[in-house]
């Protein structure tokens, strides 16, 4: 039998995962310096299947403006290079002797603003996921048997506090990333 505390605990776990997912998306956005996670969204067509770049190559950021991608299978370097180019990240990879060098161009103001818009979209996705957990838990609370109306009302208030706390966490992470993106 589900109890109110178990339901709230499950909701907290779900909201926590939503925050982590949002932060992961934020990290995939390019800021002023190179990060291996920038290429996490790249999907490579390889051996008749589509896979994440990190499943077919290692990504390193040896310099602030350079990523180096080393394919596990050197014969697939062209496919990886094409996937990076087609990922709509504004990057121009170059294949050199078994590795792919991805220089990061300096960002202009327009590109920074575009990235900020994408960041806000990711933030809203995080908000939606958190609200989804709140709604599902609220519905489950209303269906509990043998629990007083007052207990349900108190649980809903706790649920709202939890929701507000996680929304604020996502907003703080978004603002930090936005400052990083807009920094010249």
Image: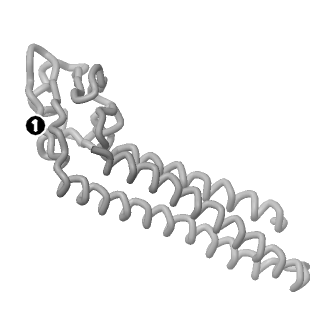
Pointer 1 residue: 92
Q: Residue furthest bottom?
A: 149
Residue 29 coordinates in the image, percent (x, y):
32, 47
Quadrant, the N terminus? bottom right
Residue at (30, 63) in percent of width and height: 117
As drawn, is 10 to the left or to the right of 184? Answer: right
As drawn, is 119 to the left or to the right of 81? Answer: right
Colouring mode (rainbow / by chain / secondary structure / one colour): one colour
As drawn, is 92 to the left or to the right of 160? Answer: left
Neighbor class of circle 1 (other Cα within 10 Å; few <14, some 14-19, many 20+) is some
Residue 127 coordinates in the image, percent (x, y):
50, 66
Residue at (64, 68) in percent of width and height: 164
| Residue 29 higher or lower than 44, as above or below | below
Residue at (53, 55) in percent of width and height: 172
| Residue 12 higher or lower than 80, as above or below | below
Closer to the camera in the image, 127 or 142: 127
Residue 87 visible in image: no
Q: Which image quarter: residue 4?
A: bottom right
| Residue 155 higher or lower than 30, as above or below | below
Residue 80 coordinates in the image, percent (x, y):
16, 32
Closer to the camera in the image, 62 or 97: 62
Quadrant, the C terminus? top left
Q: Which image quarter: residue 15?
A: bottom right
Residue at (43, 67) in percent of width and height: 124
Residue 125 coordinates in the image, percent (x, y):
43, 64
């Amino acid at each position: 039998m589900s109890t109110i505390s178990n339901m709230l605990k499950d909701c907290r776990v779900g909201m926590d995962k939503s925050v982590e997912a949002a932060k992961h998306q934020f990290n995939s956005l390019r800021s002023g310096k190179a990060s291996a996670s920038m290429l996490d969204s790249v999907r490579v067509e390889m051996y008749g299947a589509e896979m994440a770049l990190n499943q077919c190559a290692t990504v390193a950021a040896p310099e602030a403006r350079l990523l180096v991608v080393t394919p596990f299978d050197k014969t697939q370097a062209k496919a990886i290079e094409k996937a990076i180019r087609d990922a709509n990240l504004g990057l121009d990879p170059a294949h050199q002797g078994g590795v792919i060098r991805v220089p990061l161009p300096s960002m202009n103001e327009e590109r920074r603003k575009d990235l900020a818009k994408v960041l806000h979209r990711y933030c809203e996705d995080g908000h939606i996921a958190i609200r989804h957990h709140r709604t599902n838990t609220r519905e489950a609370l209303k269906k509990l048997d043998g629990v007083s109306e007052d207990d349900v009302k108190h649980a809903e208030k706790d649920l709202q506090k939890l929701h507000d706390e996680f929304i604020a966490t996502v907003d703080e992470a978004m603002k930090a990333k936005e400052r990083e993106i807009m920094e010249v």
